[in-house]
Amino acid sequence: MSATTANESRTSQSEPATEAVGRLRATFNTGVTRGLDWRVNQLQQLRALLVENEKELLEALWADLRKNATEAKMAEIDLTVGHIDETLASLESWLQPRPVEVPALFGPTTTAYTNYDPLGVVLVIGTWNFPVHLLIDPIIGALAAGNTVVAKPSEISVHTSAVLSRLLRQYFDADVLTVVEGGAEETTALLAQRFDHIFYTGNGTVGRIVMAAAAKNLTPVTLELGGKCPVFVAPDADVDEAAKRLVGGKFFNAGQACGATDYVLADPATAAALVPALRTALEAQFGSTPQTAPDYGRIVNERHFDRLTRLLDSGQVAVGGRHDRDDLYIAPTVLTDVDPASPVMQEEIFGPILPIIEVAGLDAAIAFINERDKPLGLYALTTSEATKSRLVNETSSGGVSWGQPGMQVLVPGLPFGGVGESGMGHYHGLYSLETFSHLKSVVDVPLS
Ligand code: NAD
């Protein structure tokens, strides 16, 4: 560990943003961050932080979201460590200059290639629903690309934010990575600084604030936002299997996932058959009293609890509906008879409420999706290749996943990101290196 007490004192929360950014820029300007060894060392530090402090991080995640240890280890620790390992295994080859063909006109000795150039100082702003993974995952790319970093965890996941901030200060030299804790006020102060890239995960309203601030310095942004991810359940799907897949794609982390299914589109007969199948699948997953189930999460705070319980009036509660504010518990809930104009269909749900919207069939489902903002994920449960082909070619979304909602997020070789209202830019693996680098063109016309 490269921890020093001097570093810790230099990254105190009261340090002005200008000083922190100035210090990180000075480090970048020495050129030290460009070397492969430096990058590998930083990634190994990040890996050690996660592996050596897993227990403490899991306890904080339980305190914030009642994430059970198995789920939290898988989605927050192991997934992130896996991304570090993939980057460590491939970074050297990714960084090799890529030769490009040169027109014959330029002569036989002229060569051309592309080079990944680090950007400088990067700001990473995290969110609360996967507070470890969604802060560390972009940092992997930022460090692998040879940048210095300001990390801003979400104040909403208060326990995880505190633990992660302390650990980042302990494991990283403050000249390399600085943590700034806080909410809107602290983030506003940070956004007044000039960064070389801003990577933001969260909602579109703040995304617009981030982008407006970045525009002042022509700073490029990646916005990882949310939206309403639809799932089309086709009449050819086995409803019992479909219900199991829906439960997996919706109620993980009590529905507080950007790639979670937001609502179901199905024809009336399929919709009617889904309700009892969902009741059975939910009981198989969480038992008859989900409030006591060890693997069922809680809503992050009262504000989100109140927002979600207001949405329960948007249709008939066909399954679930129970809630307990003192315990921040909302039962896995299925709503039917939902008017597309009702509140639950106006905003991203981001909680354990699943509305079923009846449509006449595939044509109507495609029209329904295309009338709304472009979602982060589009899903379908179908055995029909023709249905998949129509959905992928006739709609726009960040990604698609057939057969199991949300899987596009988990394949490391795929770019992860949204389009339109669900965001801009993408990351993971080589795409993270691209995001946090400038792809520089180099031409060499030999003098002799
Ligand atoms: P949040 O409240 O934690 O906010 C995100 C970040 O923005 C925090 O760090 C917060 O401090 C900062 N912030 C809040 N107000 C600000 C302001 N006025 N100015 C500057 N910064 C400010 O998280 P949230 O927005 O509630 O997160 C939920 C949203 O994030 C959902 O829409 C979800 O779909 C989306 N999300 C997207 C992804 C993805 O990868 N695409 C992942 C997770 C969540």
Image (cartoon, rainbow, N blue to C red):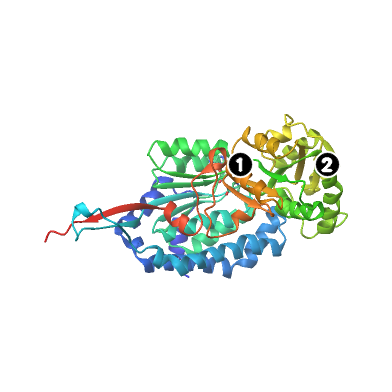
Circle 1 SS class: loop
Residue 3 in view (yes/no): no
**Which residue is rendered at x = 56% and y = 46% of the image?**
398
Q: Label 1 is placed on what type of residue? A: Pro
Q: Label 2 is placed on what type of residue? A: Ala
Instruction: Calculate the distance from the C-alpha at mark 2 to the C-alpha at mark 1.
Output: 26 Å
Q: Nearer the viewer, mark 2 or mark 1?
A: 2
Residue 74 located left or right of residue 358: left
Residue 73 located left or right of residue 6: right
Q: Is residue 35 above or below residue 131?
A: below
Q: What residue sits right under mark 2 in the picture?
A: 269
Residue 409 spot, x, y in % from top left: 59, 54
Q: Is residue 201 above or below residue 78?
A: above
Residue 297 located left or right of residue 28: right
Q: Dividing the picture into quarters, in which one does residue 68 lie?
A: bottom right
Circle 2 SS class: helix
Residue 280 located left or right of residue 424: right
Residue 198 in view (yes/no): yes
Could you say which disc has been placed on residue 375 in the image?
1
Residue 134 spot, x, y in % from top left: 57, 54
